[in-house]
Image (spheres, coloured by chain):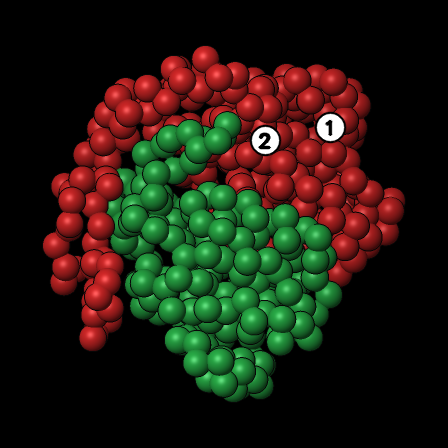
Chain colours: A green, B red
Amino acid sequence: MVLIINTTSTKELSQELKRMLTERNTEFEIVEADSMNISPCLGCNFCWLKTPGTCTIKDDYEGILVKMINADQVWIVSDTALGFIDHKGKNIIDRIMPLVTMNLEFRGDEMRHVMRYDKCADLGIIYLGEGNRDYLDQWTKRCALNLGSRALGAYPFWELKEVAACMQ
Amino acid sequence: MHAVIINGSPRVKQFSNTDKIISKFAEGFCRDGNTYELYSISDRREWDDARKAYYNNFNIIIALPLYVECVPGLLMEFLETLTPKNEYTQISYILQGGFAEGSQLRCGQDYMKILTKELGCSYGGTLVKGDNFYIRFADERERERRTGIYKEMGAVFSRDGDFFSDDCIKFTGPEVFSLPIRLMLGLMFKTLAKGLAEKTAAGLGCTKPIDCKPYIKNPLPEEMPTAEGIGCRI
């Protein structure tokens, strides 16, 4: 299942993706997170050490997290700021910490957190505005590496057709 | 020299590793009569003053923890409210994280360069160091051992006005660990480190295994479960 989390107010983008994915018979779900109440991660680490696997911030994010656990691909649609995804997009990623445990292991030549669940969704970014594509690609790869999954790339919104082709 | 230091950690000051690092850094920085003013992003009431300080000063240091390979979302939200300045303003960074290898912080460090450019300022370098996760849980002696080393870096910044010197590069430590060290650490992760994490969790009142799975994976539940409603699957 492809999970698309749209943190922007551009609903037309969701509509277009919906149209393209329906045509392709792709199983998908779109979450309109812009209107949701999603706080930033406060770095309490309670999701590792006090309430393992559960974020102590009680807002609208918990439902998204559960959907992520069950997805094969997660695409975050985000506005950009200062060359990067904006804080709304970053908050979605920062709050994934319950998906990893406090325990460590080496994967390749770097330390990683041991994953809490057997598998983690592959990760992609769709961005609006002036993002630094090279950096967003690099960052998405690093994020996926930490999650033991694959990076699907960072795409500007005008490449939506190419993105839809990657969604399966 | 006068510096504006912005603590970019979302964690409240009391529990902020970054705050403890800044304290030590500032000790070294102020040794030669330098002064600084500090603002914490975790307290939104300080945002107006932090913005004013950014506009009215030319030497800015942003200290931050690495959150998923880059700037924490809360700090990003603050940065989005800033208007670009000019090259006479220098921004330098103290970037810290939990993983011990230098390589783990390079993606974040790369963004520091992009961010500075986006804000129209000059880049004063990034002081990079990992292995800081346990600062807030450590006793006083251990905390001093982990943070005291930043005092010298404060003095280096006072001397050079940036983080480009060999002293700063060496400060990061190993980029990655050699194979024998990785094998040894890998064994420690499965034994001692796991025990330490469990002990820390118990100290916080945790009664579940730290690797429990509160959300049952597949088949997809009809109704969205909440953590309270589901027992841990070990």
Amino acid type, callout 2: Ser
Q: In terms of image quadrants, where is residue B47?
A: bottom right
Q: Secondary structure at mark 2?
A: helix
Residue that protrudes farthest toward the front in the picture: A24
Position in image of residue B32 (x %, y %): 73, 19
Residue A140 vs B192, above or below: the answer is below
- Name the secondary structure under disc 1: loop
Mark 2, other Cα within 10 Å: few <14 / some 14–19 / many ≥20: many
The residue at the point 21 percent across, 74 percent down is B223
Residue B60 visible at all = no
Identify which residue, B164 or A20, lies in the foreground.
A20
The residue drawn where x is 60% and y is 49% is A139
Locate the C terminus of chain B by quadrant: top left
- Identify the residue under disc 2: B103
Q: Are marks 2 and 1 in contact (CB under 8 Å)?
A: no
Q: Which residue is mark 1?
A: B163
- Residue located 23% across and 62% down the image: B218
Using residue B148 as the reference point, say whether residue B228 is left or right of it: left
Q: Residues within 10 Å of mark 1 (few under 14, many from 20)?
A: many
The image shows residue A54 at horizontal and vertical percentages of: 27, 53
On the image, the x and y values in percent for residue A24 come to 49, 80
Q: In terms of depth relative to the viewer, which is nearer, B158 or B127?
A: B127
> Tag 1: residue type?
Phe
- Give the letter of the chain under mark 2: B
Asked if residue B17 shows in the view, the reply is yes
Which chain does tag 1 point to? B
Q: How many angstroms separate mark 2 from mark 1 (CA)?
A: 17 Å
Q: Which of label 2 and label 1 is nearer to you?
A: 2
Q: Is residue A164 left or right of residue B156?
A: left
Q: State left or right for residue B25 relative to residue A74.
A: right
